[in-house]
Image (cartoon, grey):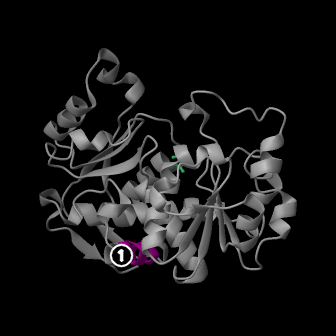
Amino acid sequence: MKKLFTMNELNVTEIEGILHEAEGFANGSSWHPKLQTMVANLFFEPSTRTKSSFEMAERKLGLEVIPFDAGTSSILKGETLYDTVKTLEAIGVNALIIRHEQDHYFDELKEKIRIPIINAGDGCGNHPTQSLLDLLTIKQEFDSFKGLKIAIIGDVRHSRVAKSNAEALTRLGAEVVFSGPPEWFDGEKGLGRYQDIDEAIATSDVVMLLRIQHERHSEKYNHANGDYLERFGLTKKREKNMKQDAIIMHPAPINRGVEIDSDLVECSRSRIFKQMENGVFIRMAVLKNVLEQTEGGMNHENCDQK
Ligand code: CP
């Protein structure tokens, strides 16, 4: 794997390989590049989890992190994304992590930039490392994806997490259904049918809530009167109807009391903070994979001892 822009670039064997390596890192395995390896995290949209967990993963792998702050960069003088990326390549950065508000921002980069790029989220398009950490969390719980039913609920249209997860989970043998406001569901390329919220929650093994992405809405959804939670969210009453071993997931950030009752965020069914913990191990595995495939990553040594 020389880069990672979308989940559909990875076949099932490659997905399983990354999950296996991430589990190894979670169990204490280590890997470090033999050569000095520089990376930069280019975040043009806000982030807490993805940016911090990439930085944590990079430091655990012994990579050197070149600081980049979009708010003080020459982007503000009109420099393009392409010229910014080309500049970082020219000064010797070995790999880039990029989050950008434009869907498929990477299309203009992939043929012209030689160093690996890992997509940390493109607009409403893709979020492959979030999907991989979600898959790891589901695998830890159920061991296999085959026969599982996953309900993805909320602002599906604007969610890159929903699209990356639905695509990967379907290929891995799970059934995906969507719920939430019907006007926020476009059919999602046939990756799953729409289901009534109560039925979706009561019959699924994984209930995955999504944040309302106000920043991507032309008109703000009016939930000021608090009816969103009752109509489309995970209430305590709906949680009581979940299957006995079903789990709750959410990519976060969470709007507590909107898509999920605040008291359920840390309840015994919730794997929300486990997802965040797994994010570090998945990003270590993805970084290891791309660096091993590049010239700058040659002669990396395997330090599999604890
Ligand atoms: N889940 C996720 O992408 O969170 P951040 O926006 O905080 O990175």
- From the viewer's perspective, is residue 233 above or below residue 134? above
- From the viewer's perspective, is residue 195 above or below residue 233? below
Determine which residue is flagged by label 1.
Answer: 12
Magenta stretch bounds: 15-25
302 displayed left or right of 220 = left
Which residue appears at 46% of the width and 46% of the height? Answer: 51
224 displayed left or right of 116 = right
Which residue appears at 70% of the width and 65% of the height? Answer: 200
Residue 301 part of the magenta-drawn span: no
Q: Quadrant of the C terminus?
A: bottom left
Which residue appears at 21% of the width and 66% of the height? Answer: 292
Some atom of ligand 1 lies within 8 Å of the CB belonging to the residue at label 1? no
Q: Determine crowd level at label 1: few under 14, some 14-19, many 20+ residues with C-alpha closer than 10 A.
A: few
| Secondary structure beneath label 1 | helix
Does the image show residue 257? no
Spot occupied by residue 271 in the image (x, y as percentages of width and height):
66, 66
Three-letter amino acid code of the residue under disc 1 = Val
Does the image show residue 47? yes
Residue closest to the eye, 139 or 89: 139
